[in-house]
Image (cartoon, rainbow, N blue to C red):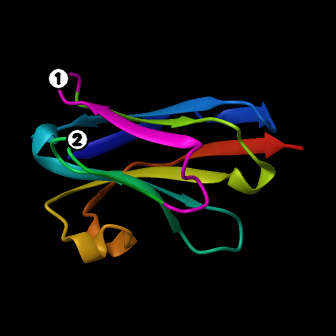
Amino acid sequence: VQLQASGGGLVQAGGSLRLSCAAAGGTFSRYDVAWFRQAPGKEREFVSAMRWNGGHTYYADSVKGRFTISRDNTKTTMFLQMNSLKPEDSAVYYCAATSRVILSAVRIASSYASWGQGTQVTVSS
């Protein structure tokens, strides 16, 4: 499946952004999906994930309560609603997808076979 992320931008601390990731070329409804982010000089880190049927969601502790992952399988699109943004949320955000990932590997980037190109999020203080 091919993924195309969008929705990044520049926002002040405390603001909100909604990222989107459109999928094409695969059966999106069968994929587990996730968002990761990477700041300059840092490793790619897990942000959030959702099971193929939306039944389970997972969040990094640093974003829990502020970010919400969702998906619309009819539109083959996934979303990341980001509220109460902080400067430390600044990074390139990547969407990812794969067929069934085991629970212990949900937060591991190498578990995901398909990646979007990334969208820049910058939060000013």
Whole-percent x, y for residue 65 in the image = 56, 45
The answer to whether 104 is drawn above or below residue 36 in the figure is: below
Q: Which residues are magenta?
A: 60-75
Task: Answer left or right for 45 relative to 53.
Answer: right
The quadrant of the image that shows the C terminus is: top right
- Magenta stretch encompasses residue 64: yes
Q: Residues within 10 Å of mark 1 (few under 14, many from 20)?
A: few
Q: Is residue 26 visible?
A: no
Task: Answer left or right for 14 relative to 69.
Answer: right
Q: Residue at x 26, y 36 (%)?
A: 23
In the rendered image, the residue lying farthest to the top is: 75
Query: On the image, numbered disc 1 is attached to which residue?
Result: 74
Q: Quadrant of residue 115?
A: bottom left
Q: Amino acid at mark 2?
A: Gly
Task: Answer left or right for 53 relative to 89.
Answer: left
Task: Answer left or right for 119 relative to 9.
Answer: left
In the rendered image, the residue lying farthest to the front is: 65
Q: Amino acid at mark 1?
A: Thr
From the viewer's perspective, is the residue at label 1 or at label 2 nearer?
2
Label for residue 54?
2
Viewer-proximal residue, 64 or 118? Answer: 64
Pointer 1 with pointer 2, Cβ within 8 A: no
Whole-percent x, y for residue 101 in the image = 19, 66
Whole-percent x, y for residue 111 in the image = 28, 71
- Dot 2 falls on a residue whose secondary structure is loop
Label for residue 55?
none
Instruction: Give the main secondary structure, helix, strand or loop, of the magenta stretch.
Output: loop
Q: Residue at x 71, y 66 (%)?
A: 40
Q: Quadrant of residue 49?
A: bottom left
Q: CA distance from mark 1 to mark 2?
A: 13 Å
